[in-house]
């Protein structure tokens, strides 16, 4: 009898989850688990939480959705808190599990977690499954991928590379084995309500995609994507993607069907193009790994000293620069910010306030309900000129951005008057 543990990480879904599918095929008994970080890791060094209440609520909703689906199939989702290695070694012992299956996350903290588990002699099988394009299909070894996005994209397009078809959800989940519940579980308690405008969970993510396509919003995406107000100017796929409530392949496959039905256009291409940016930042981690997490990133330029008071003013939206303050208040109040505003406030922190880009990235990690380690790190490095972009940094002129994107002041009014 094979007993497996399935460790859910940023893949909180049943559909198109190859690692879970494989675990279901191999196991006679399956123990689905989610592990919350230990208390000590919940605060960033400058003294703010790593997960704001918006993120906590979104996560809670996503876990509840997954738990409900698993229970509907006669299984469950067991939640624990602590270092994954500590929890999983104990769980392996008490359930008699033969191995642990999980998705691969190619970022330093997550790699370290897996290393610790393997060092304890536990068999751990990791599956790379968070990108739209498969690693094995790339027209180059990922370690030799082109540094520049444009070059990367051209080689992908030249090779006519397509994503693999997404998998359906498993029809059955192997039952839980009997074991003594000596390990304290996290009870799915209440979390503080959040004003975030998105609901977490696989069902919500799939429903959101469906309505986005039914309302033909891809057609206008290219024209509207730099707007600042409302729900429909961009796809808002990112929160569901970040926790893996939906896979990038599922979105890409639905987009391809949409194109087959209504015809391809600039909007559908541009959405695919943005999903490719997401893949690009993922694949860069295979090439550069820890170097992306150095203070100086891939550049040689020294880092800036951050004035704690400036940081406080920036993060709470009290710099006196109205567009920046509006953006930072939107982020604080909702856990979301448009791509354009992310670029502008990040640039302001780095180039106007001369702050350390890593502190800005840490604040985004704390607040964004779509926080994604690869995209956050990659975009901050890009704006700071410490990534692979040969242009060396992307400063944004606030006055020009205000004129281009909020000439009538509607966005500033929305966030400065009421907050
Ligand atoms: C400083 C900074 C930090 C960021 N941090 C994150 C983060 O933690 N998590 C995150 O998902 N995105 C991050 N982004 C990228 C981008 O802002 C968001 O993906 C996008 O705003 C999400 O909204 P949307 O789903 O409506 O995007 P859309 O414009 O509708 O794009 C569709 C999808 O393409 C992907 N995408 C779009 N733009 C980018 C991009 N620049 N980089 C990578 N993927 C992209 C996303 O998965 C997005 O859901 C960051 C950008 C900046 C400038």
Image (cartoon, grey):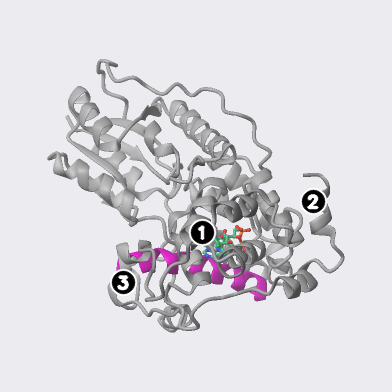
Mark 3 vs ligand 1: CB below 8 Å: no
| Left or right of residue 206: residue 69 | left
Residue 125, above or below 392: above
What is the CA distance from the residue labelled 3 to the residue labelled 1? 35 Å
Nearer to me, 177 or 110: 110
Q: Which mark is residue 69?
A: none
The picture quadrant where one finds residue 339 is bottom right
- Number of labels in the image equals 3
The residue where tag 1 is placed is 306
85 vs 105, left or right, is: left
| Residue placed furthest toward the left | 121
Residue situated in front as seen by the camera: 148 or 253: 148
Determine the CA span between mark 3 and mark 2: 45 Å
Q: Which residues are magenta?
A: 264-287
Q: Residue at x 36, y 29 (%)?
A: 81
* Mark 1 Cβ inside 8 Å of ligand 1: no
Q: Earlier in the sequence, mark 3 or mark 1?
A: 3
Which of the two discs, 2 and 1, labels the residue nearer the N terminus? 1
Give yes or no for residue 286 being in the magenta stretch. Answer: yes
Q: Is residue 79 magenta?
A: no
How busy is the neighbourhood of tag 2: few (under 14 within 10 Å), some, or many (20 plus)? some
Image region (quadrant) for ligand 1 = bottom right
Pointer 3 local density, CA inside 10 Å: few below 14, some 14–19, many at least 20: some
Q: For the stretch drawn in magenta, what is the main secondary structure?
A: helix
Residue carrying label 3: 142
Task: Identify whether 418 is placed above or below 256.
Answer: above
Pointer 2 residue: 416
Label 3 or label 2, whichever comes before in sequence order:
3
Q: CA distance from mark 2 to mark 1?
A: 25 Å
């Amino acid at each position: 009898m094979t007993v497996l543990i399935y460790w859910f990480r940023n893949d909180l879904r049943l559909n198109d989850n190859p690692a879970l599918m494989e675990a279901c095929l191999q196991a006679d008994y399956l123990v689905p688990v989610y592990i919350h970080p230990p208390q000590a890791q919940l605060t960033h060094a400058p003294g703010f939480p790593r997960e704001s209440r918006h993120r906590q609520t979104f996560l809670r909703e996503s876990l509840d959705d997954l738990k409900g689906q698993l229970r509907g199939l006669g299984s469950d989702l067991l939640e624990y808190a602590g270092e994954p290695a500590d929890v999983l070694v104990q769980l392996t012992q008490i359930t008699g599990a033969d191995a642990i299956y999980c998705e691969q996350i190619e970022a330093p903290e997550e790699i370290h977690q897996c290393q610790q588990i393997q060092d304890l002699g536990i068999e751990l099988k990791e599956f790379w499954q968070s990108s739209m394009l498969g690693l094995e299909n790339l027209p180059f070894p990922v370690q030799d991928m082109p540094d520049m996005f444009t070059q990367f994209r051209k080689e992908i397009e030249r090779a006519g590379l397509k994503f693999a078809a997404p998998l359906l959800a498993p029809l059955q989940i192997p039952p839980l084995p009997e074991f003594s519940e000596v390990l304290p579980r996290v009870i799915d308690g209440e979390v503080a309500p959040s004003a975030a405008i998105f609901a977490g969970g696989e069902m919500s993510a799939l429903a959101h995609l469906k309505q986005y396509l039914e309302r033909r919003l891809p057609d206008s995406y290219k024209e509207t994507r730099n707007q600042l107000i409302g729900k429909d100017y961009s796809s808002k796929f990112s929160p569901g993607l970040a926790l893996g409530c939906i896979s990038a392949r599922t979105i890409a496959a639905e987009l391809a069907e949409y194109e087959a039905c209504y015809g391809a256009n600039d909007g559908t291409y541009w959405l695919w193009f943005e999903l490719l940016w997401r893949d690009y930042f993922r694949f860069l981690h295979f090439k550069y790994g820890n170097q992306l997490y150095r203070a100086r990133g891939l550049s040689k330029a020294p880092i800036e000293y951050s004035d704690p008071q400036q940081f406080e003013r920036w993060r709470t939206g009290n710099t006196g620069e109205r567009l920046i303050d509006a953006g930072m208040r939107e982020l604080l109040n909702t856990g979301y910010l448009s791509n354009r505003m992310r670029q502008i406030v990040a640039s302001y922190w780095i180039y106007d306030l001369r702050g350390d880009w890593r502190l800005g990235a840490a604040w985004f990690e704390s607040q964004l309900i779509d926080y994604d380690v690869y995209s956050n790190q990659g975009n901050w490095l890009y704006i700071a000129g410490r990534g692979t972009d040969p242009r060396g940094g992307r400063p944004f002129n606030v006055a020009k951005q205000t004129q281009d994107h909020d000439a009538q002041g509607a966005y500033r009014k929305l966030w400065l008057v009421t907050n």
